[in-house]
Amino acid sequence: MIVIAVIFMMRPDFSAPDAMRACANLPATLADGYGYLSPDCVHPQLGIAMTLSPFYFGPLASVAFGVDRIEKLGKDVTSLVGGGAPVLLISDPGVSALGDRAEAILKVAGHRVARFQDIRSDPLSRQIDGAAEAARRHGARLVVGLGGGSALDVSKMAAAIATDDKPAEHYALAVNPLPAISLCKICIPTTSGTGSETTKVSVFTNEKGEKVWAWGSSLSADMSLLDPRLTVGLPAHLTAATGIDALVHAIEACTIRRANSMNDGVCFQAIGLIVEYLPRAVSTPDDLDARGHVQIAASLAGIAIDNSGTGIAHALGHALGALGHVHHGRAVGLSLRAALAWNAEAEPARHASVAAALGVASEGRKQKDVLAELSPRFDAFVRSTGLAVSLSKDGLSAKDSERLANLMMAPENKAMRDSNCRTITAADALTLSQAVLSAA
């Protein structure tokens, strides 16, 4: 049995005195924790080399977990913004019935509900703008996001920008700070992958077709509601893809430049849960125990990347999504599959720990022998979930390698490239792109 080793920080009453809450972005002193690892430093008096680099481990989103926990949604909203509140419910069109259920729960509690469902996978900036305008028209005091990562990203971003008149693209790549005041937000994931419910990031597609992101504490949910029953209807291939997304988050967060010992506990717990429970969730859809553990793992992995970031798998995966509209979870999984052994050469100790977490025997063995099994073990696990490794049916092949490499090296992917444990050159990008597109 795996014991959940992270305590979620929860306000006992989820109360908020005002309809809107001040969500100032992190000051520079805290944001410095998101910088790259500094060189080893030496104690000025003792002359002892210190290998621990500065880091920032941020406050966690308030999390409520339980089977049928959604039934308390109306009370949660009342606790946050008071009774009879105008609420905008942003839901994935693929879970329309769940959206109807959430709306009914909110209305029974006395809240006034407006709906917004114009969402696609890798949502468009104009869809976020539309959701923000819907919140303004309704006079919403709180936004509920229900669905997969795209629905949650739209809901968080819309709530963050609804208090101002600037469009979503104004805040892309953190070029401009998000508004200091945000509408309250409740995130309810129906997939177990992106971890958006526990991050302060929203990912969307701009008018140029580029996959970009916004970042800031205004994007943190006031409450994340985890109800494993809501994930039961997810098809096997999407259960696999989203679960692999969470696994990649956890692996990258503990191996990139900004990895740190405090965050490692979160990362390795998530890896262990996914390895143990994702196959069960894929093969037995109504296994609520497995679904619940994978859902917790995805939220843990969200916390992990929120505190360390992502690396090469997301730089390449975002490019793959932009090029061929490959599902995000599958895209980052295939990207890490191609890059894992290459990355391990630059950071062998941390990758050896990942190998052990994936089930590679490590006790009494040489590090190089453990690492030799890392990439094959990851590949075997990805394939065991039924995730398709070949991209030929997606209309992509090795002839698209140069285009994919160019997208990977584009400005919108720079932060992820720079976070990676190994420096990525244009030549490296081309080699890795060829590996991803040639996989069979």
Image (cartoon, grey):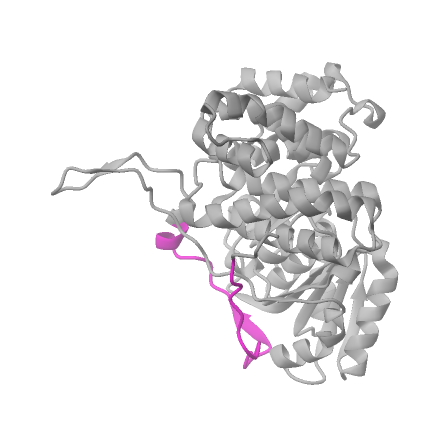
- Residue 331: percent from the left, percent from the top? 70, 33
Of residues 391 and 205, the one drawn nearer to the viewer in this rendering = 391
Question: Residue at position x 77%, y 84% from top?
Answer: 110
- Residue 398: percent from the left, percent from the top? 73, 15
Of residues 324 and 266, the one drawn nearer to the viewer in this rendering = 266
Left or right: residue 298 versus residue 396 is left
Q: What stretch is highlighted in magenta?
A: 6-31
Q: Residue furthest right?
A: 97
Q: Which residue lies furthest to the left in this view?
A: 45
- Residue 389: percent from the left, percent from the top? 75, 27
Left or right: residue 191 versus residue 29 is right
* Magenta segment includes 27: yes
Residue 230 visible in image: yes
Residue 204 visible in image: no
Question: Residue at position x 72%, y 63% from top?
Answer: 227
Q: Is residue 16 above or below residue 264?
A: below
Q: Is residue 287 above or below residue 106?
A: above
Callout count: 0
Of residues 38 and 27, the one drawn nearer to the viewer in this rendering = 38
